[in-house]
Amino acid sequence: MLTHVPGRAPGTCGERFAVLDPAVGEAFDEAPDQHPDELDAVVDRAHAAWRGWRADPVARTTALLAAADAVEAAGADLAPLLTREQGKPLAESYAEIARTAARLRYFAELDPGPQPITDGRPVRSEIRWRPIGPVAAIVPWNFPLQLASAKFAPALAAGNTMVLKPSPFTPLATRLLGSVISTALPEDVLTIVTGREPLGARLASHPGIRHVTFTGSIPTGRAVAEGAAASLARVTLELGGNDAAILLEDVDVERIADRLFWAAFRNCGQVCMAVKRVYAPARLYSQVVEALAQRAKSAVVGAGLDPESQLGPVNNAPQLARVECYTTQALADGARAAAGGHRLDRPGYFFAPTILADVPSDSRVVTEEQFGPVLPVLRYGSLDEAVEAANGTGFGLGGSVWGTDLDRAEAVADRLECGTAWINHHAELSLAQPFAGIKESGVGVAGGPWGLYGNLRPFVVHRPEEA
Ligand code: NAD
């Protein structure tokens, strides 16, 4: 019988696992449950393919641009499949595919040309950026294609090959994406492997891998870093977030309420850098809670394939249980549900968009990452208190400040301890900017040229001016 996701039983030789549609909570397809022992051959082939792939940067650019065209052309096949296994509204799946194609084009055209080193000595010395070898990528279920592309676009453009493992909750669209892209690339340059644990653990610690790039939760990130330590492979970790949004005294609540709401609830709140806590000044507190609650109550929740839906289901049963547990605990701690606060009484993994008021600051929905459609709103007295609370967790992914006086808002944003701070919006990223969480939110830098260099090694050639 097919079983759904949790790890494979030791010694079993299961060949496929079930993939569920979160809008109904039932299996609709299956994916190969690859055995970790298969990785030896996969990594060997990735290594063999690397020799040709790294040799010709011009051919690489052409192939990656062709891959971007192929992804775009396959949008009508990819988007419904992505929505079916992930849950997000169809329009968001199309946006994810567009972003995947755009990222391929962006990195295909970045040129890490030689860099001279000028330090006054009578030598000619320059850095020639070289690829590092087969890269392993492990990604989560919230943006399966977009996050996969954040791995393979810079790694392949840099001249590496890649073995990529999607989450077992969302393997299907990634497998299809892999075959679409492979029509434009030489064989074994990008290989998708699917399966349950310990497939990811074995991939992260495989001795033939030179860089492990991981996106997911903090505990798994730690395990991945430990695994990669065995071969001393380079590690890039993009981990969880608990971003705070601080509203200032001069904020125009009605003007920003839609933007703030969707910064927290897009993709059903399953965004690493969603707004996960709101800090509102005491004077505006009720107005902020009411404005957000009104939007939560009127958001249209339904299956992602229904064109009316603005919010889909939570992706999977363990995640739904986590969201429900944090909400129930907060309510037991004395919080009030200004909207939602419960599962929806229908099949599938639906949770009512929830605004929590009067939440104790030590409640888990505030101190940990809820990663779902639940938003706590906290009251603050002084601005120093708000900044301290915003910075007072182990996370450091993003943060935002909302107000009318932009200079003042920027001065407050400058005090946030995180990788990216926004003013009057949140979680908007350009392909050209660095993306780097601090504290437990990440190690290394993705995005922009920094993402490319994260997949290259400096090779220095040093020669005197005269023989
Ligand atoms: P997760 O850590 O449970 O799983 C991520 C991936 O790791 C999956 O492919 C999973 O199968 C694999 N995995 C599980 N155990 C492993 C092991 N021992 N060794 C190697 N791989 C293993 O995370 P999730 O629940 O899929 O995703 C949600 C988390 O991802 C949230 O914390 C979210 O904030 C984070 N996230 C971060 C970013 C970012 O860019 N910072 C982006 C998206 C999501």
Image (cartoon, helix red, strand yellow):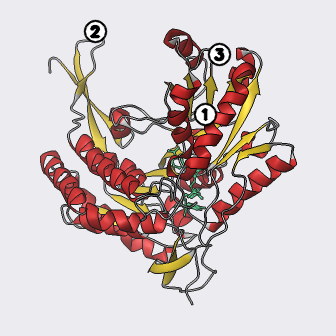
Q: Locate residue 366: give its quadrant.
A: top right
Instruction: Name the amino acid, label 2.
Output: Gly
Disc 2: which residue: 120
Query: Marks 2 and 3: which is nearer the front?
Result: 3
- Residue 241 in view here: no
Tag 1 secondary structure = loop
Q: In this rendering, would 222 be left or right of 436?
A: right
Q: Residues within 10 Å of mark 3 (few under 14, many from 20)?
A: some
Q: Position of residue 253 (x, y in %)?
A: 58, 25
First in residue order: circle 3 vs circle 1: 3
- What residue lies at 20% left-to-right and 60% top-to-bottom? 73
Disc 1: which residue: 396
- Residue 82 in view here: yes
Give ligand 1's quarter of the image: bottom right
Q: Is mark 2 within 8 Å of ligand 1?
A: no
- What residue lies at 56% left-to-right and 61% top-to-bottom? 313
Tag 3 secondary structure = loop
